[in-house]
Image: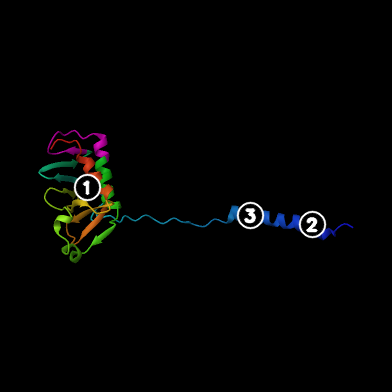
Amino acid sequence: MAPPLSGRLAWPLAAAVALVFVVGLALQGERPNAGLTSFKAAGVLTAFAPDEAYEIEVAAGSETWRFRRESEWRRVDGPELVTADLAARIDLALRLLRDAAPLRVMTADEVAEVPASEYALGPASLRVRVHALNGAIFAIQFGGRNPLGSARYARVDGSDGVSMLPTYVAEAWEQVIEGLPG
């Protein structure tokens, strides 16, 4: 005895309905902006945009390098030639100051509890001063690495605490002056 017609059609009909549902979901089931958030720069350079930087002074120990942006970056205190590679490194280092958020900002009270030598923020450390076209000035001093090596201590002018910035931010500035005569 053969099963009734409704029994024979039930499974193929259920499969067809499921297929129509999956195809409909694939064509219309999008989630608007799924997993996307708008980027907001969270770095320490907030007074102006990197493109507004006009003059930069980078110092390490007793050596100082100065750059000025006219139509392109030029060296102020030495041979004027700034290669395209060096100009790109300067622009990258500026963007990282704007974009790379501190991993942590230690308060002035926390900083006072630890000897200053632990942060290596002395006169020999890497210092960067950026002048904007609008007259604003941003200055930062990079110190030593934290015990894990994932961050560098940094003191931003106008801030009482010490920031812990990702190591690649300071390394970008070290790459700017790497190999340049003082």
The mark that comes first in sequence, 3 or 2, is 2
Contact (Cβ within 8 Å) of mark 3 with mark 2: no
Where is residue 85? Give x, y as percent. 26, 36
Name the residue tied to disc 1.
53
Residue extending farthest left: 62
Between marks 3 and 1 in the image, the one whose residue lies nearer the viewer: 3
Q: Which residues are magenta?
A: 73-88
Residue 80 painted magenta: yes
Where is residue 118? Give x, y as percent. 17, 56
Judged from the image, the secondary structure of the residue bearing numbered disc 2 is helix
Amino acid identity at mark 3: Val
Q: Image quarter for residue 112? A: bottom left
Residue 145 painted magenta: no
Name the residue tied to disc 3.
22
**How many residues crowd mark 1 within 10 Å: few (<14), some (14–19), many (20+)?**
many
Mark drawn on residue 9: 2
**How many residues crowd mark 2 within 10 Å: few (<14), some (14–19), many (20+)?**
few
Judged from the image, the secondary structure of the residue bearing numbered disc 1 is strand
**How many residues crowd mark 3 within 10 Å: few (<14), some (14–19), many (20+)?**
few
Q: Image quarter for residue 119? A: bottom left
